[in-house]
Amino acid sequence: THKIILFKMSSTAESRTKRRRGNLEARLTSDCGTGEEKQKLIKYFWCHMWPCLQKLGWIKVECTGYNDGAIYFVPKGVDPEDDYYVKGEDYYDRIRDVIDRVCSYDAPSEE
């Protein structure tokens, strides 16, 4: 009986972990469209945009502990070890937010 209870608890914990990962992935890709459009945007981000951002100094932080599995994108110049962050300024947790940030960036004019 004891082994069955442990198995059920283990199965439940595994189910929670899968559900949490699914929720985190849904959050990461939310507002990226639907179906094939969404898949194309996500593929473009990871294959083309993210490598360019990494060259510019952006980093991807994969969380452990309470936020296990969550991914945050951090622009150059932000120290991930700081205690205080402003979402949408110091870090982003959605691909769409990173794309919007890059698209709204005004490059310095050459005079």
Image (cartoon, rainbow, N blue to C red):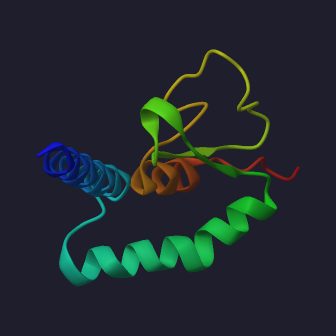
Identity of the residue drawn at 65% across and 16% down: 83
The image position of residue 86, as x and y in percent, is 54, 23
Q: Is residue 64 left or right of residue 53?
A: left
The image position of residue 63, as x and y in percent, is 55, 41
Relative height, residue 18 to residue 48 (above, below): above
Identity of the residue drawn at 88% across and 50% down: 111
Q: Nearer the viewer, residue 94 or 21?
A: 21
Q: Residue furthest front?
A: 1
Q: Is residue 27 left or right of residue 12?
A: right
Identity of the residue drawn at 37% across and 82% down: 40
Q: Nearer the viewer, residue 105 or 60?
A: 60
Q: Residue 22's quadrant in the figure? A: bottom left
Q: Residue furthest top?
A: 84
Q: Residue furthest right?
A: 111
Q: Nearer the viewer, residue 35 or 101?
A: 35
Identity of the residue drawn at 71% across and 68% down: 52
Q: Nearer the viewer, residue 85 or 4?
A: 4
Q: Is residue 28 left or right of residue 4?
A: right
